[in-house]
């Protein structure tokens, strides 16, 4: 945090350190060193309340809808028969909120390592965290996602959503081959994994994207990447991985069936779905350069 002209500013330095993203703070709501990470909740006039973990922006009230639409709906539009969902991380609640929109889903297990994140979001960010108070299918566990999938039964889930922090600190283990292999074992025959795939603009993010992609390609027969515009993340454009045992995310899209559900979404639609997997050449070249 920086005081300039009596204004308090929060800044995040992007991987290259000569670039930073700064928000003028209206309020410092919460600062806590938890057993796992530094947790800060701030308020900015434009982005509203936002959460920072270990110095990195995680979620803001202004643009959370993009990230949470895109972590959940693409997989549900490819396999509307998904019944059992495992969410890893996602302590702000936004991912569980979107999953809970599907009446056809029977079980939502969520494994978040840091209870302090959930409690802070329940207090300061009800837009995402209110799901924790009103979703009976949600089984929230405070544990390490890495250990959880290692011990989970084979074939127990149809969909795994990895909404973790970056590959450092508590989130590091969630970017390992061992973790992806355990996810493969824990997924059912038609299982789908959606994982963090970082960014493709700043050098540091590109290295993490390549590392994640190499490990996913080693583990899943189908490993695609899709992008979305999230202004509060480095370069404003971020990526998820779509790792799958049988479904191709574009060829197997069930657009008509998904549209018949009549779900209200602010970012996702089935036309955008196809576009999200149509990557720019420079991104495709980064992924094609990955040796498995
Ligand atoms: N959307 C954000 C992003 O892309 O950076 C992530 C938001 S979510 C708040 C990330 C959550 O992952 C945090 O609450 C963090 O505590 C949790 N987390 C990190 N490592 C974890 C682990 N090994 N097991 C379970 N949860 C973990």
Image (cartoon, helix red, strand yellow):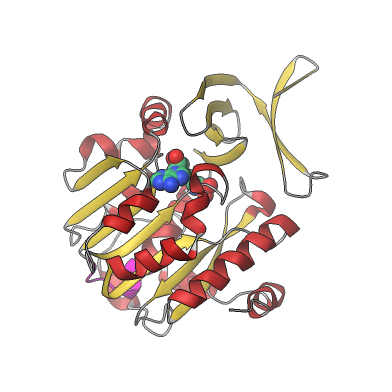
Position of residue 234 in the picture relative to residue 39 (left or right): right
Verify whether residue 77 appears in magenta: yes
207 left or right of 116 in image: right
Q: Residue furthest right?
A: 18
Q: Position of residue 234 (x, y in %)?
A: 66, 50
Of the pair 209 and 63, the residue shown nearer to us: 209
Q: Quadrant of the N terminus?
A: top right
Q: Is residue 279 magenta?
A: no
Vertical placement of 92 versus 146: above or below? above
Question: Which quadrant is the C terminus positioned in?
Answer: bottom right
Q: Is residue 288 visible?
A: yes
Residue 254 x %, y %: 32, 78
Q: What residue span does the magenta drawing correspond to? A: 75-82
Q: Position of residue 253 (x, y in %)?
A: 37, 79
- Please tell me which residue is depicted at 63% across the width and 68% down the height of the picture: 210
Q: 74 and 286: which one is in front?
A: 286
- In the rendered view, would you say 43 is above or below 265? above
């Amino acid at each position: 945090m920086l005081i300039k002209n009596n204004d308090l500013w929060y800044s995040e330095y992007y991987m290259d350190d000569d670039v930073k993203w700064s928000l003028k703070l209206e309020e410092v709501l919460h600062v806590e060193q938890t057993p796992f990470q530094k947790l800060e909740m701030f308020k900015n006039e434009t982005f509203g309340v936002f959460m920072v973990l270990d110095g990195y922006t995680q979620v803001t009230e202004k643009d959370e809808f993009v990230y949470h639409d895109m972590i959940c709906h693409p997989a549900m539009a490819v396999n509307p028969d998904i019944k059992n969902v495992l969410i890893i991380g996602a302590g702000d609640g936004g991912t569980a909120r979107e999953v809970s929109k599907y009446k056809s889903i029977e079980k939502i297990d969520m494994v978040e390592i840091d209870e302090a994140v959930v409690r802070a979001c329940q207090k300061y960010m009800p837009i995402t965290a209110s799901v924790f108070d009103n979703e009976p299918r949600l089984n929230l566990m405070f544990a390490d996602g890495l250990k959880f999938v290692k011990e989970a039964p084979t074939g127990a889930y149809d969909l795994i959503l990895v909404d973790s922090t970056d590959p450092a600190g508590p989130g590091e283990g969630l970017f390992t081959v061992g973790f992806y292999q355990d996810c493969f074992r824990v997924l059912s025959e038609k299982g789908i994994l959606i994982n963090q795939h970082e960014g493709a603009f700043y050098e540091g993010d590109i290295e993490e994207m390549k590392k994640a992609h190499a490990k996913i390609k080693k583990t899943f027969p189908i490993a695609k990447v899709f992008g979305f515009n999230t202004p509060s993340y480095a370069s404003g454009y971020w990526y998820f991985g779509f790792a799958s045992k049988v479904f191709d995310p574009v060829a197997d899209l069930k657009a008509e069936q998904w549209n018949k559900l009549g779900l209200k979404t602010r970012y996702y639609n089935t036309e955008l779905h196809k576009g999200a997997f149509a990557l720019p050449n420079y991104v495709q070249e980064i992924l094609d350069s990955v040796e498995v």
